[in-house]
């Protein structure tokens, strides 16, 4: 039983590139043990993350993540049963922000900034899919 979950949250103050790298390291170390794959995007204080895996494992991880003081205000954007993974190659891929094309953002939202709180979950998922298709996901886990 595979599921996909996507949420958005706001970084706690003081989250910098070093903290982000630590979160990614921690995720890449732990996720394979639990059969979790996914992608994490961080831009201007906002996290957007997709988790895929067994229903129990994804729910347990999401509950741990929501309680993490490094971010707040997590909002569930999408939760669905799936028959196959879209992000199977990444223990936790990172969207390479340098390669976030403003026209790609504009394709899916009113402004060229990443604001998952302002668009539907399916729009954010479409953006993620396009990022994967255009090889904008870095750091294979
Ligand atoms: C934005 C964000 C994303 C995270 N993603 C993951 C992840 O994919 N996998 C993971 O194991 N921990 C992730 N974490 C870390 C967890 O919140 C938590 O620290 C970790 O699972 C260890 O939990 P524990 O100390 O209760 O064992 C993330 C944390 C944040 C703030």
Image (tube, grey):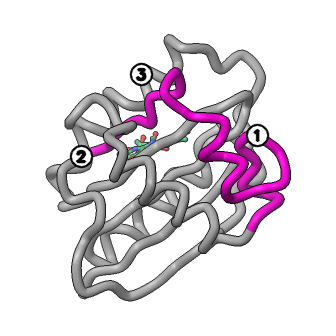
Residue 121, horizontal then vertical, whole percent:
64, 70
12 versus 18 height, above or below: below
Q: Would the CB of label 1 be found within 8 Å of ligand 1? A: no
* Mark 2 closeness class: few <14, some 14–19, many ≥20 residues within 10 Å: many
Which residue is pictured at 51% across the width and 51% down the height?
49
| Residue identified by numbered label 3 | 22
Exactly how many numbered labels are in the figure? 3
Indicate which label's residue lies in the foreground, 3 or 2: 2
Label drawn at residue 91? 2
The part of the chain drawn in magenta is 90-119
**Which mark is first along the chain, 2 or 3?**
3
Which residue is pictured at 59% across the width and 49% down the height?
48
Indicate which label's residue lies in the foreground, 2 or 1: 1
98 versus 6 height, above or below: above
| Residue identified by numbered label 1 | 112
Task: Tell me: 133 left or right of 69.
Answer: left
Which residue is pictured at 40% across the width and 35% down the height?
94
Residue 123, horizontal then vertical, whole percent:
63, 67
Which element carries disc 2, helix, strand or loop? loop
Task: Tell me: 32 left or right of 19.
Answer: left
């Amino acid at each position: 039983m595979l599921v996909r979950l996507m949420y958005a949250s706001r970084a706690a103050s003081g989250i910098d590139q070093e903290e982000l790298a630590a979160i990614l390291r921690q995720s890449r170390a732990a996720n394979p043990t639990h059969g979790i794959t996914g992608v994490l995007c961080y831009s201007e204080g906002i996290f957007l993350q997709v988790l895929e895996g067994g229903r129990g494992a994804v729910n347990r991880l999401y509950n741990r993540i929501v309680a993490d003081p490094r971010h707040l205000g997590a909002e569930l954007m999408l939760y669905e049963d799936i028959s196959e993974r879209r992000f199977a190659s990444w223990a936790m891929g990172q969207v390479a922000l340098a390669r976030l094309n403003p026209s790609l953002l504009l394709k899916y939202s009113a402004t060229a900034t990443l604001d998952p709180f302002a668009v539907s979950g399916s729009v954010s998922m479409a953006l993620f899919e396009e990022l994967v298709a255009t090889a904008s996901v870095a750091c294979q886990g």
